Amino acid sequence: MIALRFGEDFELDPGAYQLRRAGQPLKLERIPMEILLLLAEHQGQLVTREQIVERIWGKSVYLDADNSINGAIRKIRQVLKDNSEHPRFIQTVTGRGYRFIAPCPDAAPSPASAPAAQPPAARRSRVGARVAAAAGLVVLGVVAAIAVLRLRAAAVLPETRAMIAVLPFTNLTGDQRQEYFSDGLTDEMITQLGERDPTHLGVIARTSVMHYKNNPAPLDTIVRELGVQYVLEGSVRRDADHVRVTAELIRGSDQTQLWARQYDRRPADLLQLQGEIAQAIANEIQASVGRPAPIADADSVPVTHPFAAYDLYLRGAYDLNTRSVPGIERAIGYFQQAVALDSNFARAYAALAGANALLIGYASHPPRAMIAQARAAAVRALSLDPSSAEAHTAYALIVQNYDWDWTSAEREYQRAIALNPNYATAHQWYAEHLMWRGRFEEALRESERARRLDPLSLIIAADNGAILYYARQYDRAIDKWRSVLQIDPEFPRAHAIVFAYVEKRMYAEALADMEAQRAQAEPPVYWSDLAYIYGRAGRAALARAAMDSALRTAERQPVQAGVIADAYAGMGDKASALDWLERAYAEHSNDMTALKVNPGFDGLRGDPRFQRLLERVGLAPPPSP
């Protein structure tokens, strides 16, 4: 089927798997896109609901297909700005199906009969596995292909567990404001499955599966890119006193539906329901690979929380996942409201601790107030639920970055990983911990474990580049960071590439990158980094001018002292660099974690003041025997 033009400026392109208007792609989720393609293939002809069900779900379906179809048609009409009473594009034939009625002058004649039955691999089009579209998905799959093929670490660790991806649950409410709820259900299912049977079942992390929410792909592509054997799909519809959840488990090798259920519950029972679904899926997967079904631990049954508190927690998780300063700040507000409603909500306390700890890294102002809030929340979470991997991970980050208690931090990271080996963030942050301590081979192995659980994560890939940079493998670091920037040119963490450029004396490239990110950078950080680059390039006058701008803007917008120390180190002003490092130590700046491995401080390492700082933050090498 060629690209189909209709209306004033719409174009449906099966090859690119896109609906466009005036050349601009429109957001349309997987099921609505599949139904629109099916209707367009049979332009002017009735397509029955039975044909849609078979095309999207196959013949053996136990889902709430009617509601799923209704919701999908509504989304198609919304994006086309079509009216069900006076349709221009999609006509409803009451009780029977739908007809695509838009005039399409470029379209080839439609077939006279319904499509022939497809083999299972083509039928499972709910995840986009259409034979006609699959060949044309090369354009759409470029981003994912780069992410998978170029972000891989050099050493590949064997994975002996069955792996599953929980694809984003479809929001059938027709209300975009409810996206946080469907996304939250996705996150919760990932968490529930990850904790259910981690010895035998690995679960892909949120970042990677959310890639497919706005970038539909065939099931075989998803299975290949994520390295999974199973896929869970579902949908959710919610009103004031009722939640309907549908879920189906699909085997990736032959796209066979192994299990499907529909659940109707009160919102207050949602956490319990997620536990039931997770247990049923774990049982089904274990049975399919010939292992006895795991027995649910009584302690793993979710604790019931007031739904209002849980709803606030989901809203906070949605904003936290933006990984932006405003988003993290909004998330903190929601988590605070959640624990105010339910003082025993361990996961909300753990999320509050993690959000405060993250904000310190994303916002450059001094950390003291945020650390106090983060620590209190982490301690409360652990007192309520000592088995919370999220709480142990957040606490590890706090005692690492603020207390420089490396022994406790490592113990907490290892405890988190033991509790939930599927928690990608624990592996990612533990890899950073090993990096700060100069244990680079271990750090790269741990980074690879994180990548296996979250293959499309840009932050994990960018952190992998940081490990290579601090290990003085500058060419590999540049290649890694460039691969991230190819996917997202504005991804902040990958712009650390400027420091690798400096070490390679690629000053023009470093300055060009600085100019490209100037609009997004906080002024004190921008000018400090510029002073560092000019200083290393031997352009003293420009370095001093940039340093003056950094200090002036820092008066209006406080910045961590370590940022200024870096700049002075690059300029060769050792005394000022050490003075500002003393300030960084006094304010417990998390920049001090890089003291041992940062190449920018290499010119200071022979100074006794620097060696004493290393000792005070616990990063000095052990004494010789």
Image (cartoon, rainbow, N blue to C red):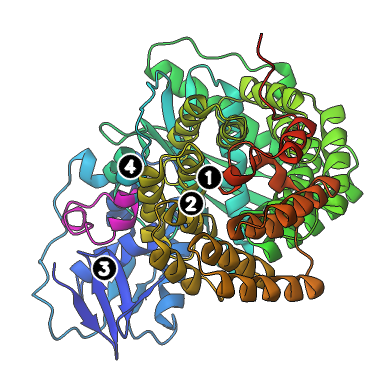
Q: Earlier in the sequence, mark 2 or mark 4?
A: 2
- Between marks 4 and 3, how big is the CA–CA gap? 29 Å
Question: Helix, strand or loop at disc 3?
Answer: helix
Q: Which mark is residue 206?
A: 1
Amino acid type for the residue under numbered disc 4: Glu
Asked if residue 305 lies in the magenta stretch, the reply is no
Q: Residue at x 25, y 46 (%)?
A: 123
Instruction: Choose mark 2 or mark 3, whichever is in front.
Output: 2
Q: What's the residue at 26%, 68% (across, down)?
A: 39
Image location (x, y in percent) of residue 617: 76, 34
Coordinates of residue 219 in the picture (x, y in percent):
31, 44
Label 2: element kind: helix
The residue sitting at 80% across, 33% down in the picture is: 616
Answer with left or right where residue 110 lies relative to residue 35: left
What range of the chain is rendered magenta? 127-146
Separation of residues labelled 3 and 1 (CA atoms): 32 Å
Give how far apart the Cα atoms at labels 4 and 1 are. 14 Å
Q: Which residue is mark 4?
A: 225
Which of pointers 3 and 1 indicates the residue nearer the eye? 1
Query: Which residue carries the number 3 mark?
Result: 39
What residue would you read off at disc 2?
A: 210
